[in-house]
Amino acid sequence: MEDKERRKQLRRINSSRRIYGADLETDTFHDENGVPDAKVVQWCVMDVAKQVETGTDLRKMMDYLIKRMKFDGASIVYFHNLNYDGTFIERNGLSSSPVSQK
């Protein structure tokens, strides 16, 4: 496929998707046994129209994203640091599907 044609095709596909940016802010601490751990102190999700949703409960962030995806259909969520945030989400048992890291 010609490069120009491929770019057109990708624009068509992406124009039908809602795009979000997401980030987690965490704090590290030691539990009662002295084991280091981390907790979410703030999360933020923003779409390209600059509609912002924030909170402190990781489950509520995941519920919000799932609700948006059910409503919007195919969506893209860019995480500021997917390597850390994705691991944190999976470690807390909140991942129900594989995460694509591109």
Image: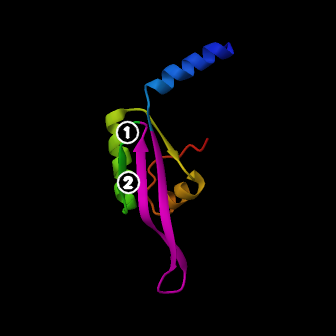
Q: Which residue is mark 2?
A: 61
Which quarter of the rendered picture does the C terminus lie within?
Answer: top right
Q: Quadrant of residue 60?
A: bottom left
In which quadrant of the rendered view does residue 83 lie? Answer: bottom right
Amino acid type of the residue that numbered disc 2 sits on in the rendered structure: Met
Between 23 and 72, the one nearer to me in the picture: 23
Find out whether residue 29 is within the magenta segment. yes
Determine the main secondary structure of the stretch shown in magenta. strand
Q: Which mark is residue 69?
A: 1
Q: Position of residue 36 (x, y in %)?
A: 55, 78
**Disc 2 residue crowd, few under 14, some 14–19, many 20+, Cα 10 Å:** many
Q: Are there few (<14), some (14-19), or many (20+) residues within 10 Å of tag 1?
A: some
Residue found farthest to the right: 2
Position of residue 40 measured from the top left corner of the image (x, y, whole percent): 44, 65
Relative to residue 97, is residue 7 drawn left or right?
Answer: right
Image side of residue 92 versus residue 54, left or right: right
Q: Locate residue 51, reporting x and y percent.
A: 36, 42
* Viewer-proximal residue among 100 and 78: 78
Kindly report the distance in space between the C-alpha atoms of the residues bearing marks 1 and 2: 12 Å
34 vs 93: above or below? below
Q: Residue furthest bottom?
A: 33
Q: Is residue 9 magenta?
A: no
Q: Tell me the magenta residue range.
A: 20-48
Amino acid type assigned to the residue bearing label 1 in the image: Met
